[in-house]
Amino acid sequence: MSDQDDHRARRMWRALEPVHAVTYFAPESKAACDALGTKGYWMSYCALRGAPLGEASPQVVTALFYNFAPGLIARALPAAWQVASAERFRAVRLETVDAALHRLLGADLLASPEVVEAAELAREAALAAPTAGRALAAANAALEWPDAPHLVLWHAQTILREHRGDGHVAALLTAGLDPVETLVAFAAGAGLDAQWLRERRGWSEQEWADAADRLVERGLLDPAGSLTSAGEDRRREVEAHTDALADVPWAALGDERAQRLTELVAPVVSAILAGDGLLLTNPMGLRPLVAQPSAGTS
């Protein structure tokens, strides 16, 4: 395990992100959006993730999602808002996450005291997450909290992951990496299939090649497509900056209770991974962390 993997904020993201990921990967969400009249996966994704912003323009959503090609977003929005209002998509998001978690987790786990405790801890962390300069986090934090503990846990992680993502964009801007350069460098550093990632984010072959050329010119990528030592350093700097910016909620919660949260949520994440709640090869490069109970905890 690298030093970055051991950073508290990264451990918490790995431990909790699958709870949010069901929003996009479990089939209930897309099926409900299809029933509304959306066309294709990306229209439903953009509507569900962008709905907390209201009926935002494709330009605003492209700016905030950052590494998606503008054309991909423009094909999804504002067309989705003509299918249904952002308010309706917010309701669909909550309804379908509820249905997916009921199916994946089962009634006993959903009603367990461990999920209740996990929801309380995650909510406390989310309420401590600063939203200044973080539009996606702020938009989700402004929504009404659900009542059911499993949905409180989901909503808290939604705020926390968008808080982390907004900070990641700030780190990328500071590092001088534009959206497509970010993906080229990420694919090279994380060992992801470049063509698969390019297609998932909507960039053309020429846009991808031009970004790679720019990175080669700056000494961050070699002509064979591998990160140089300078490129590796830049990527580590971005990730370290992202972790530092994401750590405020976990500092507020404290190490002991943060660790307790990872242990409490482990059965939830295990059930999600055992079902169809997460694409295991994913564009985030997420490697889920399922914590084991530590001595002295139940």
Image (cartoon, rainbow, N blue to C red):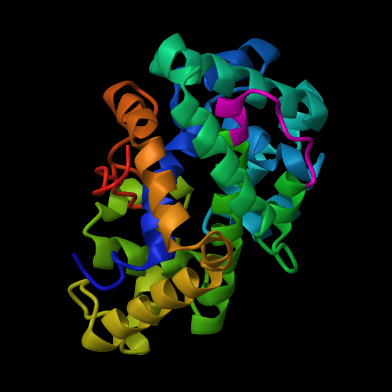
Indicate the quadrant containing the N terminus: top left, top right, bottom left or bottom right. Answer: bottom left
- Quarter occupied by residue 230: bottom left
- Quarter occupied by residue 30: top right
Pinpoint residue 68: horizontal percent, then vertical percent. Answer: 54, 53
Instruction: Look at the image and tell me whether residue 70 can be seen.
Output: no
Asked if 200 appears above or below 220 in the picture, the reply is above
> Relative to 203, is 146 on the left or the right?
right
> Relative to 94, is 280 on the left or the right?
left
Q: Which of the pair 151/226 is nearer the observer? A: 151
Residue 203 in magenta stretch = no
Q: What residue appears at the point 23 percent right and 83 percent down from the top-left corner?
A: 228
Asked if 44 appears above or below 232 in the picture, the reply is above
Pinpoint residue 67: horizontal percent, then vertical percent. Answer: 52, 58
Magenta segment, prevailing SS (helix, strand or loop): loop
Residue 151 in magenta stretch = yes
The magenta region covers 142-152
- Quarter occupied by residue 256: bottom left
Pinpoint residue 4: horizontal percent, then vertical percent. Answer: 31, 70
Q: What residue appears at the point 69 percent right and 64 percent down from the top-left corner?
A: 130
Q: How many marks?
A: 0
Q: What residue appears at the point 24 percent right and 52 percent down from the top-left corner?
A: 193
